[in-house]
Amino acid sequence: MSQTYFAHAYEKSVDSQPRKTNVVAALVRDRYVADAIVILENTPRRAAKLVKKAVESANANLLNNSKVSIDPKTIRIARIVVTSGTRIRRFKPASRGRALPYEKISSNIFVEVAGEEKVKKAEKAAEPAEKAKKEKK
C-alpha cells in the first residue's frame, strides 16, 4: 500500500485581482498536475501564467523535498486557494487640484499538491510469489 505525500507553494502579492485569478484557478482545481499545466498554457488570461508558476513550484517542492521518490503520474492538485493580498492606495490627479483615489489590488495563490510514493519493482514481484506459496499450502 502506497502512502500519500503533500507539498505546497505560496505565491504572494501577485499583481492580479483575486476575482480574476480565481476564475483561472477554478479551471485546474482537483486535476492532475500534468493536465493542469497543459490547460494553463492554453488559457488566454494573464493570471494563467501566475497560477502555472505556483502549480509548478508546488510540484517541484513535492518531487525534490520529500524523502521518498514520488511517482510524477500520481501528482494531483489537492487544494488551490486564491485570497486577496495587500491593497496599495494611489491617487490620480484630476481637474481643479483634486486627487481621485484608486487601489492596486493584489492576490495570494496557495497551491497544495498530493502524490503517491513509487512502488518498488521488487515489492511487486514479491507479492505474486507470496500468493503462490499460500496457495500451495
Image (tube, helix red, strand yellow):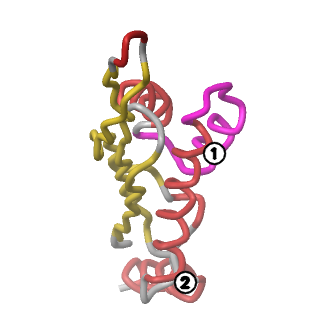
Q: In the image, residue 66 lies at what x, y percent?
A: 43, 82
- Kind of residue sitting beneath label 1: Ile
Q: In the image, residue 132 lies at what x, y percent?
A: 47, 80
Residue that badge 1 annotates: 37
Q: In the image, residue 134 lies at what x, y percent?
A: 37, 82
What is the quadrant of the C terminus in the image?
A: bottom left
Distance Cα–Cα, label 1 vs label 2:
27 Å
Q: Residue at x 37, y 68 (%)?
A: 7
* Magenta-span inclusion, residue 133: no
Residue that badge 2 annotates: 120
The boundaries of the magenta stretch are 30-47
Q: How many numbered marks have been drawn onto this rendered protein structure?
A: 2
Q: Residue at x 47, y 63 (%)?
A: 58
Vertical relation: 17 (above or below) 87: above
Q: Residue at x 40, y 77 (%)?
A: 135
Q: Between residue 136 and residue 123, name the one nearer to us.
A: 123
Query: Which circle marks residue 109 in the picture?
Result: none
Vertical relation: 4 (above or below) 50: below
